[in-house]
Amino acid sequence: MADEASMFALAFRDSPIGMAILDEDGRYLEVNGTFLRIIGRTSRDLTGHYFGVHTHPDDLNRDVELMGQLSSGELPYFQVQKRFLHHSGDTVWTRVTVSNAQAPTGTARRFIAQVEDITEIRRAKDLLERRALYDHLTGLANRNLLIDRLTRALDGHEKRSTTVACIFLDIDHFKIVNDSLGHEAGDNLLIEIATRIRGCVRSGDTVARLGGDEFVVILDNVVSQAAAEGHLAVIAEAVQVPFKIEEHEVVPTVSAGLAMAEEGITAESLVRNADMATYTAKQGGRNRYEVFSSKLRNEALTRLSIEAELRTALREGELVVYYQPVVELATREIVAFEALVRWQHPTRGLVMPDEFIPICEEANLVVPLGAMVLHEACDFIARNPRFNGRVFVNVSTRQIGSADLTRVVKQALAASGIPARRLGLEITESGMLLATNAAHSDLAAITNLGVDLIIDDFGTGYSALSSVLQNPVSGLKLAREFTLRLGDRAIGDRISTTIATLTQSLNMYGVIEGVETEAQYRQARRHGWTYGQGYLFGRPSPVERIVFGADGSVNILPAPDATADTLAAQ
Ligand code: C2E
Ligand code: MG
Ligand code: MG
């Protein structure tokens, strides 16, 4: 018996787990070294003292109650996470298991407590919780916390006279900063913008980052839509202050959407409404905001149904390619065709690309669509051996780089058996500015195959010519808006002359687009343009209406009736 007692004493003293024996009133009778180390106390501090003295006040009531249940026999033991007050003043998190000691009958009741230090585990857990609720880059709320706060705000506001507004913000052209100046620069810009937005809101408002360059602000307790618009204006202005990244000055702007709480709306729907409004703001030219409305929702729904229809259209072959001639101005001889896609819609008739290409781009359908057009265009050349000119195909930025346009081009060339020099690609000036590094090497690979690359809609992208010419381009097309201004003896004529001269001196392939009248034709020639395209020389036509003669002539048959294509131009 004595041996057993001393064995127990040893085990108690040397246990790597903190241990204490308490009397019926919760006073320490015995404590071991590990327990003393955990809470940074000496045995003198504890022995004979009530356990509550070193217990965190927030945990005391619970512990007292549990000890009571242990005494009364309601519980055989209990285990809790409990905070002790360390000698240093810190709080120590522990896991404590307390049980009744088997005391011989007639002796007083004893409690045995086992104590493990779980401060590190708690710290890791707190960190995980923080990660789960906050954006690691900016420290702003993340989507989870945003939805949680917004749900609470929406629950609360029905009892008040004020309302809740949700602002969605998207940084304009963030991708350009990220791609051209690097991810670190991009991150710095995000952090700076987060700070600016936070600096504009009231203490009860929540600012969140949803990832990427999207931010959301919840205005709780806002009196009206006008007041919310006022807040939005303040934020937009604060964001616009020039910002220096390395030696570059960036003037950030945002496209924003505002949505006001409606009766019974959920947090997710309110954020989605604001997002939808932002989308419209971006479509409308960026650096502006839109307020969500049911009209806007209907437009979005139409888009969604068009998107669904387009998937079918691609499968069912409803997307067809028309070809518009490009002529040598001096002779009016057809030297090339531009492939232009149309949607032969089962009920709506011929739908023009401006209506569906942007939707394809958003919905990631432009990659399969682009591949289809490339294959068709190469086939067009292969099937018309009497024609020895080129075909130009429009490609959108999303087809280049990660979508591996080089591979698609190779496949189209191989399938049709035409040489690379018979194919050209057109990329808009703005598309070229948005191209990533991966895209630039994709373009270089394509030109190495022998396929020419030309800049479309030149003059509309506000780019420094030098930045566009960093790409392996061999030609450009003057945007139609300048052709419309030919003969104005002002900016239209000046731009046309300058660019024609430039094209010649760089020995590039220069095309003036949208020539509709003889007067424009004469001006174009006078300004020095070599090639032209426009209704004057021929409209975009389906293959059936393009007839190649044995003598090399090309005849474009008129449309049997006025289709949407010809109507659109009148
Ligand atoms: P774009 O590449 O600048 O094509 C020229 C547009 O101007 C065509 O419009 C053409 O029909 C129109 N056009 C040509 N001559 C005249 C003229 O004398 N007067 C007028 N008013 N218009 C003229 P379209 O076919 O509606 O195409 C619009 C845009 O859609 C194209 O502009 C191009 O950016 C895009 N697009 C067309 N097909 C494709 C495609 O297969 N892939 C991609 N990514 N984009 C395409
Ligand atoms: Mg084009
Ligand atoms: Mg164009």
Image (cartoon, rainbow, N blue to C red):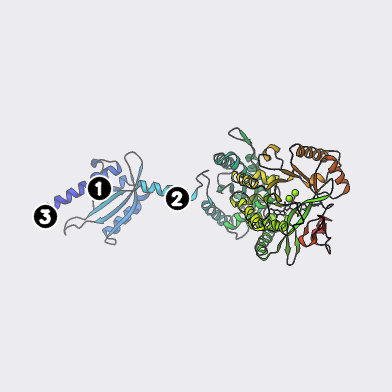
- Residue that numbered label 3 is attached to: 1
Q: Describe the element under mark 2 as helix, strand or loop.
A: helix
**Residue 477 versus residue 343 in the image, above or below:** above
Question: What is the C-alpha distance between the residues marked 1 and 3?
Answer: 24 Å
Residue at the far bottom in the pictured view: 347
Q: Describe the element under mark 3 as helix, strand or loop.
A: loop
Q: Please state the horizontal and vertical placement of residue 166, each as a whole percent of the image.
A: 61, 51
Q: Amino acid at mark 3?
A: Met
Of marks 1 and 3, which one's residue comes earlier in the chain? 3
Q: Please state the horizontal and vertical placement of residue 523, each as a whole percent of the image.
A: 86, 43
- Residue that numbered label 1 is attached to: 16
Mark 1 burial class by Cα count in 10 Å: few <14, some 14-19, many 20+? some
* Foreground disc of the pair 3, 2: 2
- Residue that numbered label 2 is attached to: 129
Q: Describe the element under mark 1 as helix, strand or loop.
A: loop
Residue at the far left in the pictured view: 2
